[in-house]
Amino acid sequence: MVCWALITDVIDYSELKTGRREDGTVYALYSFARKLGQAASAGLTGLLLELIGYSAATRTDPVVQEGLFNISVLVPALGFALLAAILWFWYPLHKKQVDENVIALKKKHASEA
């Protein structure tokens, strides 16, 4: 959900930087990155299950069940913390910048009309 909330800001930012509005290109890159992320997460899930020793024979083992719990709780929590850190420290489009972009685009579009 965070990505969908930010995608229009990225499109506006791109228009200001390049002078062209390229919605399709931005959406295509986003879609490609999302598919890469889904593939990576599937591979990571298999790797984590292998690391905890999960199999049909060991699925009721208490150690494996604890590992499943940790995968289900800790991995998403770490992912959320990483995403929050990236958005806070690296992502350039904070509220002030987005508001400035909206004003600049309104001026640009008004002068073109």
Image: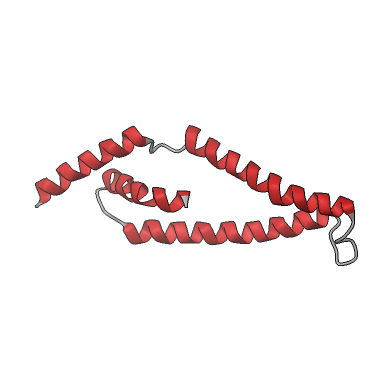
Q: Looking at the picture, does residue 101 appear above or below residue 68?
A: above
Taking 15 as reference, is 76 left or right? right
Q: Residue, x 21% and y 39% (percent of image)?
A: 103
Q: Residue 88 at what x, y percent from top left?
A: 48, 34
Report which quarter residue 107 is drawn in.
top left
Taking 82 as reference, is 96 left or right? left
Q: Residue 7 at what x, y percent from top left?
A: 39, 51
Camera-nearest residue between 27 and 62: 62
Report which quarter residue 30 is drawn in.
bottom left
Is residue 71 at least partly visible in the picture? yes
Q: Residue 79 at what x, y percent from top left?
A: 61, 45
Q: Looking at the picture, does residue 58 appear above or below residue 72?
A: below
Q: How is the image coloured?
A: secondary structure
Q: Residue furthest bottom?
A: 56
Q: Residue, x 84% and y 59% (percent of image)?
A: 54
Camera-nearest residue between 40 and 58: 58
Camera-nearest residue between 68 and 40: 68
